Image: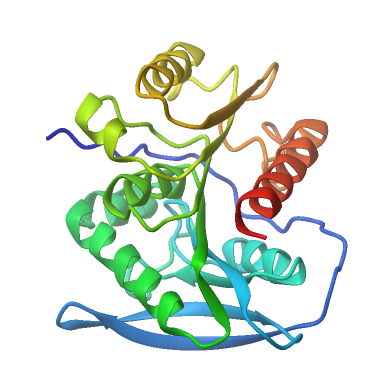
Amino acid sequence: MRRIAMLACWCILGVSAVALAGPVRTQDITFPSGAETLAGYLVLPESGGKHPAVLVIHEWWGLNDWVKEQARSLAEQGYVALAVDLYRGQVAYDPSLAHELMRGMPQDRAVRDLKAAFDYLAARPDVNKEKIGSVGWCMGGGFSLLLAVDEPRLAACVVNYGSMPTDSADIQKIQAPVLGNFGAEDRGIPPSAVEAFERAMKAANKSLDVKVYPGAGHAFENPNNKLGYREVAAEDAWKRTLTFLDHSLK
């Protein structure tokens, strides 16, 4: 069965500006993934009770400050957010190392790690195990969809300019509703690929909401992408993400 290829993502490190919605607390955690121990950055709402949860999947740079900020922003909206460290503690600050780390990461291991992270969240007493979603950007967006293929319990999937499955059998396995945000000027993931994914999802009677932003390229949501950042499109994509997650998980 074909798998989606990981895209070398020219994402830029940065910090998003999101209005505070509620106090949160952060933890560096570990949990098992097969015979290995995996690390993650967990952000919890201060409010009690059970919460919906979101797996936050990093770009090819690794689990850096920008990804942690996204997790905190989601927790401020009432989600238990877990950013998974797929690179085993390594973080890249230049494209050559990022490419090396991404190429050296076995795809099946990464999917196993994400499924282990899902199981970790599902077992927490403060998480509603029926309401766990995933969000990823560039490489992480592709893995968000891979998780949707391999994890039928996933309740929502957000892909931001990530690669998409083309095999009909993989698409048929997707149970979660999917939200996609893409750039019309993205040379790695052109609108034609997005349109093909839309057609395949429609043919399989799957739930998909896609928006392609005119004048936006890859990594357009990152404010430190000085040449590629598109503020209006980025704000709209974030609003779409929160609306979608609220509808699917709350």
Q: Which residue lies at the image location 43% right of the left edge and 24% below the top edge?
A: 188
Answer with the quarter of the image where residue 23 lies.
Answer: bottom right
Across and down, in percent, residue 145 comes to 39, 43
Q: Answer above or below: position of 99 versus 26.
A: above
Answer with the quarter of the image where residue 118 lies.
Answer: bottom left
From where the camera sits, is residue 11 visible?
A: yes
Across and down, in percent, residue 76 comes to 76, 70
Q: Nearer the viewer, residue 10 or 59?
A: 59
Q: Which residue lies at the image location 51% right of the left edge and 87% below the top edge?
A: 28
Q: Answer above or below: position of 128 versus 5.
A: below
Drawn side of residue 35 relative to residue 237, left or right:
left
Q: Which residue lies at the image location 14% right of the left edge and 82% below the top edge?
A: 35
Q: In which quarter of the image is the C terminus?
A: bottom right
Q: Quadrant of the N terminus?
A: top left
Drawn side of residue 9 relative to residue 236, left or right:
left
Q: Nearer the viewer, residue 205 or 225?
A: 205
Q: Answer above or below: position of 25 versus 95.
A: below
Across and down, in percent, residue 224 comes to 70, 48
Q: Answer above or below: position of 164 versus 136.
A: above
Number of marks in the image?
Answer: 0
